[in-house]
Image (cartoon, coloured by chain):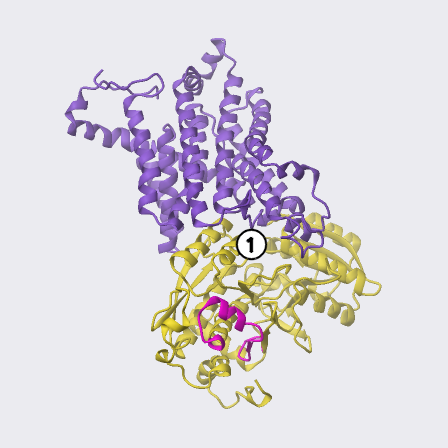
Amino acid sequence: MINPFTHKYMNGREALGFAILAAIIFVLFPLVLEPFRLNLFGKYLTYAFVAVGLVLCWGVGGILSLGQGVFFGLGGYCMAMFLKLEASSPENTAIQSTPGIPDFMDWNQLTALPWWWEPFNSFAFTIFAVVAVPVVFAFVIGVAMFRRRVGGVYFAIITQAIAAILTILIIGQQGFTGGVNGITDLRTLHGWDIRTDEAKTTLYFVNGVLLFAVLFAAQFVRKSKLGRLLIAMRDQEDRVRFSGYDVANFKIFVFCLGAAFAAIGGAMFTLQVGFMSPSFVGIVPSIEMVIFAAVGGRLSILGAVYGTLLVNWAKTTFSESFPELWLLGLGALFIAVVMAFPNGLAGVWAEQVAPRLRKLWPGNAAAPENTPAE
Amino acid sequence: MSENEKPKNYAGMSRRAVLAGGAALSASLFTPKFLRAQDFPTAEINTTGLAVTDDTVTIGILHSVTGTMAISETGSVQAEKLAIEQINAQGGILGRKIEYIQEDGASDWPTFAEKAKKLLVNDKVASVMGCWTSASRKAVLPVFEQYNGFLYYPTFYEGLEESPNVIYTGQEATQQIIAGLDWVNQTKGAKSFYLLGSDYIWPRTSNKIARKHIENFMDGCKVVGEEYYPLGHTQFNSVINKIRLKKPDVIYAIVVGGSNVAFYKQLKAAGIDMTKESPILLTISVTEDEIRGIGGENIEGAYACMKYFQSLDNPNNEAFVSAFKEMWGDDMVIGDVTQAAYLGPWLWKAAVEKAGSFDVDKVRAASPEIELTSAPEGYVKVHENHHLWSKTRVGRAQADGQYEVVYETADLVEPDPFPEGYQ
């Protein structure tokens, strides 16, 4: 082995990939982007949490969920509830009929805070709930589906239905949830104004650190025995079952993990954008998030981050330049990627760019192909 | 302004002259002489670093031109561009031509927030004409308040809001609802009402105000049903059956967007002939724009309560309609919100010229009491609560997709975004 840096969970090339992404996120972006654009990229990176979760569920585990927006939304809503309560102090809401409750509740004739809002006065509980609520929800779905051996396209359709149901529920209960407007006008976190440029920059770095924590966790899962089992399940589920493994438990675990990733992204989204609305919970955003993963390459966790950045950057840039035509451009990008590069950006890298780079770099040419299991 | 300064008569003026002249009126209120840019040094009229040069001032247009709301918001974009072109043809504002940066909100509320921030922070626009749905306004509101932007919001909406950074050029709920209910009660003898709407804040708040008014302020009147359907819902047969069972005098419908098409077609298919007025259909959500989708023959005979109809018979409106059609094509129709959007640039121009500055704080301070005599809907005035005094009108839908105006309030109705007794 020429490369001295190898490890059970990460070989040299993968470590280099992580380092390059870290350099881009922590050094390049903050240096070249003005605060407004940096905040935008911070927003894009919150979607990357979901995409990384999808790589594990879909690319590695073969479980296509078209309802990841549900978990992104639940995480985001938990955070939004805490921030909204802080923004709704009796002094701030003195003009309402009932001061001290969120404004949308007042508009809907609620006179007291619903009991299930009360715990969100506590930041510690909120942090716990951001992850726990979506994970418990994913666990319930997972147990209900995977124990009955519902999988494949049926599972995808059911997750889509859940996304639709939750959206309708949130919109319908507007006195409790803010309805279609969502929970807006979030201001401070423990008295720290999250709307200033400095706060947004700080949150961008917090977001970046959390994203790397999630990426390392994903890498660990993929390289562990669990990851190899997931791949085996994806390709030959029956054989794994006949070998004595309980397939459903693995599926439930990876589905819950994907949900937890998405929820952290959702909470960071709320902090950086300053509101949460049902437009992130529904079917369309959920499918969009699958597209991010597909463009990046559904087999590659780093590819998912690049895919998310590319699609969202393209979305913003196209729509700023061609307000009336940009959707066509974006559609063309998706079609082009899927037609030409079915493995997404990561596939382009692995099949086109990396071999040529290796030729240019003879020292590495002798290195054995250390391709991961996929 | 005094009585004798008011526009007298357009008779004898050519349509072209009306076009240019009618629009010029608002400017003449505060600026009797032609304004030259050099009389207003940029450093003095722009102390906060907005996008103002010696010859131009940049504003933002922020509407959805893609997605489900595009069909509704396109009219507003067109009206705003028309107003900007007309203002520029007269020499602009403080001698500066208006340039605009258009952004697409894509019918997606977070995108609205992102684009609003881009316009204010990156482009430093002096004001923004934009938003349509309440949700998009709620999403951009914190951005406008944080960066002290100035938004002209054109849509009739639920009220309960009074931001120092927004001028609301549409009606708030009480302006649209109360006069219409009184009218249908007094002239048609209607006593029982069935309330119906799409499920979000505007229909719910509007129906809440309607219910309070019916139950507390209209003798012997009652609400016999109230129901909501998700946005985009297309199956109204069950509610139509309930309506036939309860036999209300009035169906009060606040169905929005694409659902309207299904709703009115199914009403007609169920044998409810709105031209026979039993029951009467009264809506606050169908403008001429929506009728294009519904089809005039499907809604003929229904009543709508708005502040503006394309068929309004006054010289201002005649000039506006022909200018709009000349710019955007003869087959265009103009709805209530389109007209309200047209007012935005004019109200801003009047406020800037009254303030003698583009600074948002000064424009805000100058905005109350601004009046427009050239508005297509007639005379309007900005209230100190940032909404407009305007008339309420009832129109009856015709098979050709236009409304025939059957009633208008004698006086301007005061905007009351936080109505006492209706909460």
Relative image position of residue A179 (x, y in whole percent): 62, 47
Check residue A94 for magenta coloring: no
The chain assigned the colour purple in the figure is: A
Vertical order, A161 against B360 (above or below): above
Q: Is residue A331 visible?
A: no
Q: Amino acid at mark 1?
A: Lys
Query: Residue at 48% of width from left, 88% of height from top?
Result: B13
Residue A95, quarter of the rendered image: bottom right
**So how many labels did they put on this image?**
1
Vertical order, B335 against A43 (above or below): below
**Quadrant into which the C terminus of chain B falls:** bottom right
Relative image position of residue B369 (x, y in whole percent): 58, 75
**Quadrant into which the N terminus of chain B falls:** bottom right
In the orientation shown, which residue stands out farthest toward the right?
A: B220
Q: Which residues are magenta?
A: B353-378
- Closer to the camera in the image, A166 or B231: A166
In the orientation shown, which residue stands out farthest toward the front?
A: A191
Q: Is residue A63 visible?
A: yes
Relative image position of residue A281 (x, y in whole percent): 54, 40
Q: Is residue B189 left or right of residue B383?
A: right
Residue B300, quarter of the rendered image: bottom right
Label 1's element? helix
Relative image position of residue B212 (x, y in whole percent): 76, 59
Near mark 1 (Cα within 10 A), the count class, few <14, some 14-19 or many ≥20, is many
The chain assigned the colour yellow in the figure is: B
- Closer to the camera in the image, A333 or A56: A56
Q: Is residue B305 left or right of residue B8?
A: right
Check residue B375 for magenta coloring: yes
- Closer to the camera in the image, B313 or A130: A130
Q: Which residue is disc 1 drawn over? A: B138
In which chain is the residue bearing label 1? B
